[in-house]
Image (cartoon, rainbow, N blue to C red):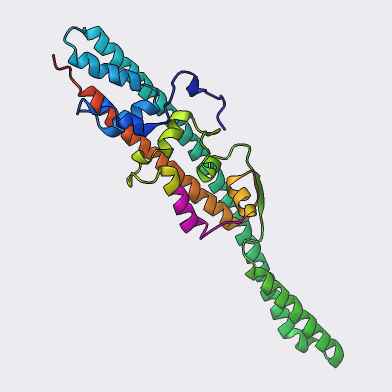
């Protein structure tokens, strides 16, 4: 978890009505793309982008007005990038932590299975040579039967791979909000949460990043609908994890981290547009 709780919302206000933004006059100047406009809104600097367009077309405005708008815009982009990097760092730490637990549990289960297999072989071998050692009929049968039962029991035990589990509880679960999709996120900054929920930021432009992530989780990681117990385990407060369940959590965290990381590409493109935007005087 982050050491400090930075409140980005107090400095930058996000307008949650992207449709009205794109229908406005902000499609001009043409050097800015639609995604630039909604990124400016996500960073709380849409007003400065509008002002930048105004001072560009106004011959009476000075260079100081232009530079002031440009500076405010870049400050907003720096803020939204900081939000993105903070969540990415936290996701990366959680991926490493969960993977370490998965590897540890896998190794322990592997060692236990190896030990039980060896014990089963030893007992099975001892049962086979028992008739040579024991000459009395009744004790011999009892020994063979009991030895076979023990050997069979150990063999069945070794088939139950991954039977060791681990308790893992979450005070802050970054998988929770992408799964339940609240209007306002508790774990994610407002600007970043806006981007993740706006369909204009996804390749389909019909479904948001959050919706697409959940669809992939259901299909590939969950293999269909989940019950309340499984939902709380992965997306709630946690609980008792088996080896395979830890691996699933690693996959979901990694996929979420990759999706959040694509936001940096959009930020890079917006900064590129800003750096190459020239006043037409």
Q: Is residue 193 left or right of residue 117?
A: left
Quadrant hosting residue 82: top left
Residue 234 lies within the magenta run: no
Q: Is residue 71 visible in the rendered structure shown here?
A: yes
* 24 up-or-down from 140: above or below: above
Q: Is residue 136 left or right of residue 161?
A: right
Q: Where in the figure is residue 175, as x and y percent of width and height?
A: 53, 43
Quadrant hosting residue 20: top left
Main SS of residues in magenta: helix
* 240 up-or-down from 132: above or below: above
Q: Where in the figure is residue 169, as x and y percent of width and height?
A: 65, 43
Q: Where in the figure is residue 53, as x and y percent of width and height?
A: 24, 19
Residue found 23% across the figure and 23% down from its top: 275
Q: Where in the figure is residue 235, as x and y percent of width and height?
A: 58, 46
Which residue is farthest bottom? 137
Residue found 42% across the figure and 48% down from its top: 212
Could you say which is closer to the camera, residue 118 or residue 150?
Answer: 150
Could you say which is closer to the camera, residue 18 or residue 259?
Answer: 18
């Amino acid at each position: 978890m982050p050491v400090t709780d930075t409140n980005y919302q107090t400095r930058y206000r996000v307008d949650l009505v992207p449709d009205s933004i794109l229908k406005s006059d902000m499609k001009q100047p043409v050097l800015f793309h639609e995604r630039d406009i909604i990124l400016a809104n996500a960073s709380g600097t849409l007003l400065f982008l509008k002002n930048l367009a105004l001072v560009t077309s106004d011959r009476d405005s000075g260079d100081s007005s232009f530079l002031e708008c440009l500076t405010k815009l870049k400050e907003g982009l720096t803020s939204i990038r900081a939000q993105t990097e903070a969540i990415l760092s936290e996701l990366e730490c959680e991926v490493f932590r969960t993977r370490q637990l998965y590897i540890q549990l896998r190794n322990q289960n592997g060692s236990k299975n190896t030990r039980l297999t060896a014990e089963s072989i030893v007992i099975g071998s001892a049962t086979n040579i028992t008739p040579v050692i024991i000459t009395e009929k009744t004790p011999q049968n009892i020994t063979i039967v009991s030895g076979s039962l023990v050997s069979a029991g150990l063999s069945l035990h070794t088939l139950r791979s991954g039977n060791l589990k681990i308790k893992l509880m979450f005070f802050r679960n970054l998988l929770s909000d992408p799964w339940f999709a609240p209007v306002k996120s508790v774990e994610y900054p407002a600007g970043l949460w806006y981007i993740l929920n706006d369909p204009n930021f996804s390749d389909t432009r019909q479904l948001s990043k959050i919706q697409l992530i959940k669809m992939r989780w259901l299909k590939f990681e969950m293999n269909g609908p989940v019950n309340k117990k499984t939902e709380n385990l992965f997306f709630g407060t946690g609980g008792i994890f088996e080896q395979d369940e830890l691996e699933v959590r690693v996959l979901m965290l990694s996929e979420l981290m990759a999706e959040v990381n694509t936001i940096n590409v959009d930020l890079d493109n917006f900064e590129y547009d800003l750096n190459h935007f020239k006043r037409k005087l």
